[in-house]
Image: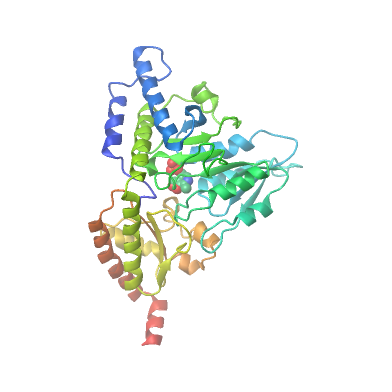
Amino acid sequence: MDANATTPLLPEVFEAMRPFWMEHFGNASSIHQQGQHARGAVEQARTQVARFLHCLNSEFVFTSGGTESDNLALFGILSPESAEPAHLITTTIEHHAVLNAAESLAKRNVGAFSPSVQVTFLPSTSEGLIEPAALKAAIRPNTKLVSIMYANNETGVIQPIPELAAIAHAAGALFHTDAVQASGKLPLDLSAGSPLKDVDLLTLSGHKIYAPKGIGVLFVRKNVRLTPMLHGGTHERQRRAGTENVACIVGLGKATELAATWLTTDAPAKLTALRDRFEQTLLAQIDDCGINGGGAPRVSNTSNLYFNHLEAEALVIALDLKGLSVSGGSACQSGAAEPSHVLTAMGLPPARARASIRFSLSRLTTDEEIDEALKIIPTAVARLRELSPSYRKLTEATA
Ligand code: PLP
């Protein structure tokens, strides 16, 4: 139950990729037949991704994943040095791929008379939401880019992206959204008449949608000028130099096609029902626990629960020993003693943030697996609480 960390390759994705590791290994830039075969496969995948996003084939760049796409969005828009400092607005609950890129931009000219980028980090509500009024209030005449994630990787909370993007546009700023955890879970229609029409840049990552790790996409709306980060050949319309990762691009194309189909079936509703059954059963069986972000709209697969009077790290290990993989905080944070920056930004007391676990279901999660998890978790929580002085004190007081 850790699909927000990564997902397995779907067999159809693997089969689509297989020939491009072996017999069709050509470089998509070569003019001979081997090369042209690879080029054809890259362009077919481009069409699949364009259909998934409802955009033009020329409106996105293949990258090495979500981290690169987020960095390319921020540095690509804010890098050009100008006499006037540019202003970036992002949030305190972003993935580190955005947070650390923003901090790096802010620090770039430390000590100089006028720094090239000023950054505002918008606060989160206690439910993990970014309020449109807060964005409106933070906009300045020099705001050049607003970057707000679509669905949070830890809580699954969905931000009101159409409204936030419209506010940015009305103020003359560009809008980027990290849609790594929204893609494959929510429809993404970037066409002119759609609610997402004001989104200028959007990040996708292959390994969250059953494609391989190390491949991603940055959508860049037509007429948005992006300064490349990598300098080299003329690949990807001069926006991202480097020989195309043909097999992974083919895998990503196939995965977007499968995700688009999955979203039109009753499977997403079934996944929501499975997640809700999981949550309601645990909440009924275990005292002093609850859902972080439970009052906000959430993607159907994510459940961030707190079990007061225990340490999440200990529960992660106890569940792992029973064969259940979950995450305390985000995967990249695992092992860190600090409570999650997302839960902290939502105003959770440190003890509750440190007692929080993320369960994330995949498209492949079954009823039987949920039944099994529902057997394992209450026992593990009870065992750990037996060792907890604060829980013992509480039970003695109420006895
Ligand atoms: N953005 C979000 C919201 C994520 O959850 C992740 C990965 O966990 C990333 C960005 C980074 O993507 P990648 O692992 O492809 O670099």
Query: Residue 88 in the image: x percent, y percent?
Result: 64, 45
Image quarter (top left, top right, bottom left or bottom right) of the C terminus: bottom left
Query: Residue 341 in the image: x percent, y percent?
Result: 52, 57
Q: Residue furthest toward the left?
A: 368
Residue 79 is at least partly visible in this image: yes
Query: Residue 386 in the image: x percent, y percent?
Result: 33, 76
Here the colouring is rainbow
Q: Nearer the viewer, residue 311 or 97?
A: 97
Is 209 on the left or on the right of 296, as rendered?
Answer: left
Q: Quadrant of residue 145?
A: top right
Residue 148 is at least partly visible in this image: no
Query: Residue 227 in the image: x percent, y percent?
Result: 60, 30
Image quarter (top left, top right, bottom left or bottom right) of the N terminus: bottom left
Q: Residue at the spot x=25%, y=57% of the render?
A: 367
Relative vertical location of residue 309 with respect to residue 115 in this rendering, above or below: below
Q: Residue at the spot x=54%, y=29% of the render?
A: 230
